[in-house]
Structure formats: structure tokens, C-alpha cells
């Protein structure tokens, strides 16, 4: 069995599986875990763990103590980043999509992650369920109705100009007074935010991590991507900083989405059962979900995240089929193809990084989304890499990039078309007037079996919540354990508990706005990480046997 040069065979099993068959290992004297502090229940990287944990606790304390002062500062930071660097975020995301598509078509796509003779660790069903649930579960539930309705409202209102500057939020040029054109444009804009670009962001991180860990023998950590650039210095402070940023980005990006999920679940419980949607109910909800997450952590990856992910997919498919059957079935079926066509037709204009007149949309929506996805990329990318050993690069990219994008098109079409149909054809204004977290339930309220479908929706949000929290704990634990993937369970439980504490603290302190800004802020340095990762991927794949 091959091993990393310099890696002690006795400890190799604690890090990553050795390549199966031919692979081009990197010759390094670094031993995975050599900088770790080892105790009975903990095995953590001394600097990455301590600095990350301290920074997170400090951030929460400062946000709660001085929230009236720091929230405007973080909001200004978010607005400045998305306003002045929108071109950078949009241009970078375009590069990621083009590289993924190029690798699918190139001979480099034949390289197998984990060595030429490696076999997949999971079936297609289990693998796809895990990567999809970890990547976008809560977001699709939260924005499946809300975003198409928002873009429709702004598009049909057309453009408004004050002092020579557009002040509307319509995508591209809008569609003033034309309901059909506004619906088509709103669906194209929504699919744009949930299609190829975000999944390409995840795919780049996941592919880079899988390649340098499973084929090159380096730790399953973000710093490993930088080895072609930094060499052995990647094991020192430059690498420590990269991994610390990865931990912060993972936790902040995850907590932002978990906050949205908690708000939607609490709103759904109020809608269905009349449970008061208060701080107390949200805290109890987060605490209960944290307990469920701990149980999932304790039973392990195969019985925990994998099983929950498969439950997620089953419930999501049931809810999707329900919407298709009882909703405007013909409009949804035909809309899938027309919306896909509208998305592809508008894709060049929507992804254009320069000379945009729709500044509010491109900066406030697209740039914010790309920065948010990038802040999630260490979490989702590492988790996808962790469960993707044995796949060829071509198979990996098709599954991670194309398949979820098509599922997103179908999901957004079903939910968005149903909500738009209620507004345009039936004159129902409840969805448009409902709060963001209630729009899904307002739409379901107009369909048969409201109580059952709403309960399934709430359950989906909660299980997606648990899956994301468990997956995030796994990823953060791997980074703070110096790349070890079989670190002691108690420290993974520590991160799960800390996520719950952060979510509760920020819900009580009203710090979600600051947290969203922090998530976007961490997206900037990780955009640079991803661009470097593109170069590393190509160089690494070219050296691999195929």
C-alpha cells in the first residue's frame, strides 16, 4: 500500500486513505498531525484550533456587547465589498464555470480521485444525496418561492432612473408591464443564482482538495491546495492562516444559513400550529436541533449524515412531486424547458462582470450570492471531497456541476411557477405580501393538503439544518485536527455545540445582519484561494496517470 513519503505508516490510517494503484504522490517530510496536541479526547492542531476557537468566541462576545455599533460597520463592509468588487466576484465565478466545463471535455477528466484503481466509497444515491443536502438544502427551501416572486415584482415594475442612476432592483433591463416576460426573466435570474456558477464554486474547492489529498498524499485541508505555490512553507504560518480563514468562513457562512433556516422553521410552526414565533421559540428550536445534531455526530458519518441526507432527498422528492401534481402541472413541465432556455439565453448578460446598468441587482443579489457561496466553499467543498474518493474527474464534475444544476432548475420552476401562477392568474397577493420566511407556507396554503405539505416543509428545513450542522462539524473538525479525518468524536461534538451557541447568541443579539456581512467578507480572500486552486488543479491533474 502506497503512503506519503515521510508519513509514518502507523499514523497514515488516521489521516487519509493511501492511493489505490498508480498516483503521483508529493514528496514531503511533513507528517500529518505532527503539530497536534494529543489528549485522550482531543487531537487538534495547536495553532489552528486555538486561534479559530478564540476568534469565534471573541466575535460573538463583541457582536452581542456592541451590536448597535458593529452592525452598521459590518453592513457598510458588505455593501462596499459587493459594490466595489462585484466585477471581481462575477468574473471569478465565470472562470470557475469555464474550467469545470473544460475539464469535463478534456483528457484530464479521465484521472481518478484516489488513484487509478480506486473504487467509490458510496453508491450514487448516497453520494448525490450527501453533496446536494450539504450544498443547498436550506437555501432552496427558503428562496424557492421568495426569489422568483421578488425578481418578478421588480422586473414588471421596469426601470427607474434618478439623477442619471438606476435605482430599481430589476434584473438586466426589466420587463415593464409585461407579466409573461417578467416571469421568464425572474426565473432566469433565479436559476442563474442556483445553477452552474455556485456549483462550479463548490466543485473547484472539492476537486482541488480531493486531488491533493487522495492522489498527492497531502492533508485534507485547504492549505494543501497552496503546495504548488508555497512548497514546504505551507506547513508554517502561511498555511495556518489559510486554515484559520477556512474555519471562520465555514462557521460564519454556515451560521448565516442556519439562522435563515431557524427563522423559516419557526415561522412555519406559527403558521401551522399557532406556536408563537418569538426569540424563545427560536432558541428552543436551535437547541433541539443541536441535540439532534450531536446524536448524528455520535453515530458517525455513514449512519448520521448519510442517512439524514437520504431522508432529506426522499422528503424533498415527495414535496417536489406534490407541487408538480397538485400545482399547475402543465405550466411546470413546459416551464422547465422554457425556463432552462431563458436561463441559457440570458446567461451571458447575467454573468457579464463589467458595464452593468442593473447595479442594484448585480451587486445586491449576484455579487452577494457569489461571495456567500464562496464563504461556504471550504465547508461544502471539503465535505464533497471527503465523500467523493474513487470517482473520475469527469464523473465527479458532471455529478457535482450539471446534475444539481438541473435539479435546481426543476425545483425553482415548480415552486416559482406555482407562486407566480397564484399571483398572475388567480390574483392571490398573499405570497407577495408575506414575510420572506413565510412565502413558502403562504404558497402551500393555496394548495390541497396544506397541513401535511407545510409539515413536510418544516421537517425538511429542520433535517436540512441538522445535515448542514453535522457536515459543518465534520469539516471544521478535519481542518482544526491538522487534516485528520478520524479525529476523536468529542472534538467534533465541540464544534457542533459551538455552532448552536453561535446561532442562539446571534438570534438573541440580532446579529444576523453582521453575520451575513462577515460571511461575505470571508468570501473575498477565498475567491483568491479558488483562483489559485484553478492553477493547482490543472498542474496536479497533468502530473497524474490516466
Image (cartoon, rainbow, N blue to C red):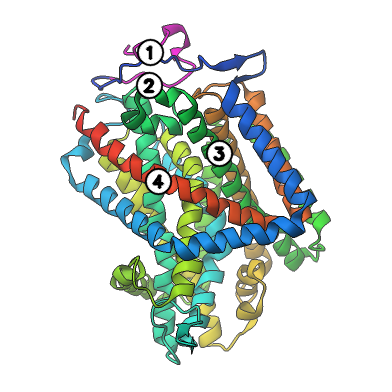
Task: Report the Cα–Cα distance between label 1 and label 4.
Answer: 27 Å
Task: Report the Cα–Cα distance between label 2 and label 3.
Answer: 30 Å
> Going by the picture, which residue comes out furthest to the front?
163
Sort mark 1 into few (<14), some (14-19) or many (20+) by Cα contacts within 10 Å. few
Task: Report the Cα–Cα distance between label 4 and label 3.
Answer: 24 Å
Q: What label does residue 471 carry, if any?
A: 3
Whether the residues at callouts 2 and 1 have beta carbons within 8 Å, the answer is yes
Q: Mark 2, mark 1: which one is toward the viewer?
A: 2
Task: Name the residue beneath numbered marker 1.
Answer: 29
Q: What label does residue 232 carry, if any?
A: 2
Vertical relation: 84 (above or below) 300: below
Confirm whether residue 456 shows in the render.
no
Q: Earlier in the sequence, mark 2 or mark 3?
A: 2
Secondary structure mostly seen in magenta is loop
Does 69 sit left or right of 196 as displayed?
Answer: right
Task: Report the Cα–Cα distance between label 4 and label 2.
Answer: 20 Å
The residue stretch that appears in magenta: 1-20
Sort mark 4 into few (<14), some (14-19) or many (20+) by Cα contacts within 10 Å. some
Amino acid at each position: 500500500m502506497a503512503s506519503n513519503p515521510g508519513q509514518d505508516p502507523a499514523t497514515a490510517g488516521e489521516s487519509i486513505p493511501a492511493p489505490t494503484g498508480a498516483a503521483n504522490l508529493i514528496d514531503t517530510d511533513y507528517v500529518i498531525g505532527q503539530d497536534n496536541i494529543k489528549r485522550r479526547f482531543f487531537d487538534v492542531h495547536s495553532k489552528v484550533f486555538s486561534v479559530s476557537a478564540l476568534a469565534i468566541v471573541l466575535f460573538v462576545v463583541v457582536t452581542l456587547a456592541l451590536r448597535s455599533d458593529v452592525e452598521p460597520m459590518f453592513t457598510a463592509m458588505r455593501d462596499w465589498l459587493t459594490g466595489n468588487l462585484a466585477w471581481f466576484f462575477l468574473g471569478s465565478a465565470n472562470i470557475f464555470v469555464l474550467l469545470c466545463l473544460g475539464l469535463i471535455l478534456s483528457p484530464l477528466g479521465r484521472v481518478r480521485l484516489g488513484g487509478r484503481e480506486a473504487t467509490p466509497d458510496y453508491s450514487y444515491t448516497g453520494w448525490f444525496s450527501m453533496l446536494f443536502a450539504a450544498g443547498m438544502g436550506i437555501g432552496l427551501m427558503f428562496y424557492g418561492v421568495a426569489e422568483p416572486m421578488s425578481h418578478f415584482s421588480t422586473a414588471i415594475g421596469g426601470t427607474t432612473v434618478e439623477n442619471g442612476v438606476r435605482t430599481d432592483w430589476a434584473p438586466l433591463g426589466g420587463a415593464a408591464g409585461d407579466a409573461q416576460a417578467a416571469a421568464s426573466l425572474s426565473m432566469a435570474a433565479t436559476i442563474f443564482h442556483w445553477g452552474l456558477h455556485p456549483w462550479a464554486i463548490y466543485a473547484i474547492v472539492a476537486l482541488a482538495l480531493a486531488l491533493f489529498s487522495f492522489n498527492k498524499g497531502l492533508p485534507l485541508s485547504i492549505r494543501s491546495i497552496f503546495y504548488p505555490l508555497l512548497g514546504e512553507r505551507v506547513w508554517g504560518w502561511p498555511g495556518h492562516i489559510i486554515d484559520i480563514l477556512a474555519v471562520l468562513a465555514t462557521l460564519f457562512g454556515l451560521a448565516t444559513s442556519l439562522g435563515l433556516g431557524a427563522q423559516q422553521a419557526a415561522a412555519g410552526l406559527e403558521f401551522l400550529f399557532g406556536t408563537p414565533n418569538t426569540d424563545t421559540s427560536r432558541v428552543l428550536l436551535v437547541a433541539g436541533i443541536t441535540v439532534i445534531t450531536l446524536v448524528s455526530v455520535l453515530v458517525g458519518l455513514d449512519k448520521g449524515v448519510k442517512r439524514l441526507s437520504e431522508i432529506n432527498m426522499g422528503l424533498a422528492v415527495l414535496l417536489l412531486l406534490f407541487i408538480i401534481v397538485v400545482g399547475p402541472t402543465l405550466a411546470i413541465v413546459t416551464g422547465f424547458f422554457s425556463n432552462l432556455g431563458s436561463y441559457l439565453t440570458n446567461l451571458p448578460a447575467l454573468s457579464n462582470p463589467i458595464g452593468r446598468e442593473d447595479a442594484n441587482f448585480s451587486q445586491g443579489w449576484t455579487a452577494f450570492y457569489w461571495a456567500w457561496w464562496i464563504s461556504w466553499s471550504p465547508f461544502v467543498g471539503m465535505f464533497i471531497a471527503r465523500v467523493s474518493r474513487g470517482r473520475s474527474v469527469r464523473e465527479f464534475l458532471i455529478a457535482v456541476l450539471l446534475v444539481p444544476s438541473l435539479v435546481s432548475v426543476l425545483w425553482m420552476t415548480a415552486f416559482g411557477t406555482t407562486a407566480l401562477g397564484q399571483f398572475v392568474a388567480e390574483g392571490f397577493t398573499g405570497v407577495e405580501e408575506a414575510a420572506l420566511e413565510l412565502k413558502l407556507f403562504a404558497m402551500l396554503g393555496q394548495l390541497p393538503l396544506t397541513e401535511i405539505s407545510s409539515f413536510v416543509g418544516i421537517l425538511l428545513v429542520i433535517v436540512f439544518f441538522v445535515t448542514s450542522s453535522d457536515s459543518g462539524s465534520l469539516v471544521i473538525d478535519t481542518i482544526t485536527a491538522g487534516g485528520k479525518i478520524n479525529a476523536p468524536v468529542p472534538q467534533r461534538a465541540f464544534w457542533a455545540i459551538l455552532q448552536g451557541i453561535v446561532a442562539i447568541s446571534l438570534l438573541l443579539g440580532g446579529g444576523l445582519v453582521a453575520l451575513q456581512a462577515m460571511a461575505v467578507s470571508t468570501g473575498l480572500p477565498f475567491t483568491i484561494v479558488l483562483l489559485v486552486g484553478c492553477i493547482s488543479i490543472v498542474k496536479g491533474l497533468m502530473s497524474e496517470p490516466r
